[in-house]
Structures are given as structure tokens and as C-alpha cells.
Image: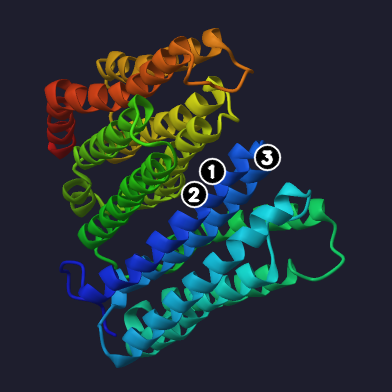
């Protein structure tokens, strides 16, 4: 482990990422169930905790593998062990959501066991890198120590008798410390030999996998709806909208030339990578919103406004974060982007307004023609926002990106 030769993603890394499809799907399912049951606040809290745990462990593995992933037997075994941790963590998610719904902490012993298994192999790998790469020994050792201390903290949050408020405060402090630690380590001891081009590819692929979860959620939700009630206008609209949203978000994300920019300016990687933590959660939540839409239509227990918000909010967050990623990478403020940004969000705002005007409280009944027309309209409007995002970036935004990058390249 003397520093990885820059290159593309390995089959082992792709195999590792597959476990995250499971984790994202379980978290999205639990969020959808919580929203359907009216436990929105508790569900969002448990979901945020779940997404942080999963994505932060993934990010740490990616950081190490980009620097020292030599794909030998020890590295492979350590990676598979981490995959086991992801699966165990996923088993703890239903308990986390249930406890949170009853006023408890989102943390539980099963989650922590899974999380520790996801992290401890990295301690061994960082120590190995410290031994075999003297040039970056202090950085690697600092990572190993920081991860070890963090795991002790996570274990302590599961001690019996701790008040829920104190536990949640401790979890927030631990998460904040974990986010700050890598920045401090690499500023103080020097950068680990990670490859910014590889980092960009890895983050892009996990975004792609998460978008695949949106497609899977669409198929699953519509499949259940069709099986129980047969094909209907609502089922067709949900299926078509799910695919349009997934394709639009994929298109918009890859319009930002992350690999090119990060390879040229590696220091921009830290803020860019941190912005992906909410992005992964928001993309997976789009799948949850589609499940909520199907459940609301099938069981007629949710109002049109609740269905609209469940889908519109995560889509809006993803769109905002795509613009944020652009700004973090390009480091340029372009006033002409503001009309594009506003124009992208207008269909979403219109969908929410329509849903609020139709009836914000009464459960939706598709036998009512007005309700059916309103449902089709609001879901189509949310999908339209993704289309506006893509067309706007293709016609306007991308040329601005090229101009901004050229300005940065000037001496």
C-alpha cells in the first residue's frame, strides 16, 4: 500500500456498492411507511440518521480505496466484512423507525453493531497503509485513531438508561465531529494520496445506483397498485413520472463535469463530497415519495397535498443540490443561472399550490374526477421540473459552465 495508481473503479468497488441498494431501499420503505402512518417528523428524523450512517461509512471506504485500494486478498476480505456490516445495519433500520415513532432514539444496538463492522476494518487498513507508506504515515495514523475513537462514541450512545434527548444530542455531535475530522486531518498532516478523478467516478456511480432505487421503487409501487386495483390512469401516471424523474435527475447530475474539475482542482473535493450526503438521501427519498403516492391512491388514506409534498420536496432538494454542486465545483456565480433555477422550481411550487387549493385535508378519492385530474396534474408538474432542469442546463447552463472553467484556467 504505497498509494494507488490512478485508474477506474474496480469490480470489487462495484460489488461493494450493491449492498447500498439494500440499505437505501430499506430506509426509503420505512420512510414511506412512516409518512403513510402520519409519523412524518419521527420518520424524517430516523431517515436522516439512517442516511448519514450508511453514506458516511460508504464515503470513508471510498476515500481509503481511492488512496490505497490495491485489490489484494486482505483488502478484499476487509471489504466483504464491511458489506456484512451494511446488511446488519439494514436489519436495524425497521427497529430504528419504530423506536423513533414512539418517542425513542433512532439509534439501537443492531444499528451500532452494523455500523462498527462497517468502520473497524478501515482502522486495520489505515494502519497497514501507515506502515507501508511512510510519506503519508501521520495522515493514515490520524484516520485510524479518529475512526477508533468515533466507534467508541457510537457504542456509548447505546448504553441503557440514557435519556432520548441526550442520546440524540450525542449522535448529532458525533456526526458533526466525523464530518469535520477528515478536513482537519488532511490540512494538518497532508493529503492522503486519493485520486480526485476516481472520487468523482465513485460518487457518480453511487448516485446512479441510488437513482436505480427510484426506478425499482416505481416498479414495485405500481406493481402492487396494479395487482390490487388493475391498471388505471393513476397507475400509468405514477409509472411514467417515476421514470421521467429518474432520467431527468440522472441527466442533470451528469451535466456537471465533476471529474474534469476535481482533477484540475483537487481542493474542491471536500465541500463537493459533503454536499453528496444530503443528495443521496434526497434521491432515495424520491423513491419513498413514489411509494407514498401509490399507497395513497390505493388505500385512499392520504390527502392530495400529502402525496404531493412527499414527492415534490425530495425532487426539489435534489434540484437545489445539483445547482449547489455546480457552484461548489465551478466557484462562479452566474446571474443568468437564477432564472433557470427559479424556472425549474416553478412547476414544483405550482404542484403544491394546486394540491393545497383542491383539498389539503381530505383523503384523495379517485372516483371523484376532480381529484383524479388534480393528481395527474401535480405529479406531471413535479416531473416537468426535471425536464426543465435538463433542457435549461443543455441550452444555457452547460455553456456557462465552460465559460466559468475557462475563466478559472486563465493565469
Q: Is residue 114 above or below residue 367?
A: below
- Comes first in the chain, label 3 or label 2: 2
At numbered mark 3, what does the secondary structure look like: helix, strand or loop?
loop
At numbered mark 1, what does the secondary structure look like: helix, strand or loop?
helix
Which percent across, then down, holds residue 191? 35, 65
Number of the label disc, if any, that sits on residue 28 = 2
- Residue at which label 1 appears: 32
At numbered mark 2, what does the secondary structure look like: helix, strand or loop?
helix
Depth check, front residue: 75 or 349: 349
Residue visible at 14% across and 39% down in the picture:
409
Disc 2 to disc 1, C-alpha distance = 6 Å
Which percent across, then down, holds residue 114? 56, 73
Label 2 CA crowd tier, 10 Å (few <14, some 14–19, many 20+): many
Depth check, front residue: 322 or 328: 322
CB under 8 Å between callouts 1 and 3? no
Tell me if 153 is positioned left or right of 399 in this view: right
Tell me if 1 is positioned left or right of 25 in this view: left
Which percent across, then down, holds residue 209? 30, 55
Assign the C terminus to one quadrant of the image.
Answer: top left
Q: Is residue 145 visible?
A: yes
Which percent across, then down, holds residue 89? 55, 68
Disc 3 to disc 2, C-alpha distance = 14 Å
CB under 8 Å between callouts 2 and 1? yes
Number of the label disc, if any, that sits on residue 242 = none
Residue visible at 56% across and 51% down in the picture:
30
Residue visible at 64% across and 18% down in the picture:
361
- Residue at which label 3 appears: 39
Label 1 CA crowd tier, 10 Å (few <14, some 14–19, many 20+): many
Label 3 CA crowd tier, 10 Å (few <14, some 14–19, many 20+): some
- Comes first in the chain, label 1 or label 3: 1
Residue 198 appears in which quarter of the rendering? bottom left
Q: Is residue 274 above or below residue 147?
A: above
Amino acid at each position: 500500500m504505497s498509494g494507488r495508481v490512478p485508474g477506474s473503479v474496480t469490480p470489487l468497488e462495484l460489488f461493494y456498492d450493491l449492498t447500498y441498494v439494500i440499505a437505501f431501499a430499506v430506509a426509503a420503505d420505512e420512510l414511506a411507511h412512516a409518512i403513510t402512518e402520519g409519523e412524518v417528523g419521527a420518520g424524517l428524523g430516523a431517515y436522516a440518521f439512517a442516511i448519514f450512517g450508511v453514506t458516511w461509512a460508504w464515503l470513508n471506504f471510498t476515500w481509503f480505496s481511492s488512496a490505497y485500494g490495491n485489490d489484494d486478498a486482505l483488502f478484499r476480505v476487509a471489504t466483504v466484512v464491511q458489506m456484512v456490516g451494511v446488511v446488519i445495519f439494514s436489519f436495524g433500520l425497521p427497529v430504528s423507525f419504530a423506536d423513533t415513532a414512539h418517542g425513542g432514539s433512532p439509534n439501537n444496538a443492531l444499528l451500532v453493531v452494523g455500523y462498527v463492522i462497517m468502520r473497524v476494518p478501515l482502522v486495520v487498513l489505515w494502519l497497514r497503509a501507515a506502515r507501508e507508506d511512510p510519506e503519508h504515515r501521520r495522515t493514515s495514523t490520524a484516520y485510524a485513531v479518529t475512526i477508533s475513537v468515533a466507534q467508541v462514541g457510537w457504542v456509548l450512545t447505546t448504553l441503557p438508561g440514557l435519556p432520548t434527548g441526550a442520546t440524540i444530542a450525542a449522535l448529532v455531535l458525533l456526526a458533526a465531529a466525523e464530518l469535520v475530522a477528515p478536513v482537519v486531518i488532511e490540512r494538518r498532516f497532508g493529503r492522503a494520496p486519493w485520486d480526485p478523478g476516481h472520487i468523482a467516478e465513485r460518487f457518480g456511480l453511487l448516485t446512479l445506483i441510488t437513482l436505480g432505487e427510484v426506478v425499482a421503487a416505481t416498479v414495485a409501487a405500481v406493481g402492487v397498485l396494479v395487482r390490487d386495483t388493475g391498471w388505471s390512469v393513476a397507475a400509468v401516471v405514477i409509472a411514467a413520472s417515476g421514470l421521467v424523474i429518474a432520467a431527468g435527475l440522472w441527466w442533470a447530475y451528469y451535466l456537471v463535469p465533476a471529474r474534469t474539475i476535481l482533477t484540475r482542482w483537487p481542493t474542491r473535493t471536500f465541500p463537493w463530497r459533503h454536499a453528496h450526503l444530503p443528495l443521496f438521501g434526497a434521491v432515495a427519498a424520491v423513491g419513498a415519495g413514489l411509494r407514498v403516492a401509490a399507497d395513497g391512491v390505493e388505500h385512499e388514506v392520504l390527502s392530495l397535498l400529502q402525496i404531493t409534498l412527499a414527492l415534490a420536496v425530495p425532487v426539489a432538494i435534489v434540484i437545489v443540490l445539483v445547482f449547489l454542486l455546480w457552484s461548489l465545483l465551478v466557484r462562479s456565480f452566474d446571474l443568468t443561472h437564477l432564472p433557470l433555477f427559479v424556472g425549474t422550481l416553478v412547476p414544483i411550487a405550482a404542484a403544491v399550490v394546486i394540491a393545497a387549493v383542491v383539498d389539503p385535508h381530505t383523503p384523495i378519492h379517485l372516483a371523484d374526477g376532480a381529484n383524479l385530474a388534480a393528481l395527474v396534474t401535480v405529479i406531471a408538474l413535479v416531473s416537468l421540473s426535471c425536464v426543465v432542469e435538463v433542457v435549461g442546463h443543455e441550452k444555457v447552463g452547460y455553456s456557462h459552465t465552460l465559460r466559468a472553467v475557462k475563466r478559472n484556467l486563465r493565469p
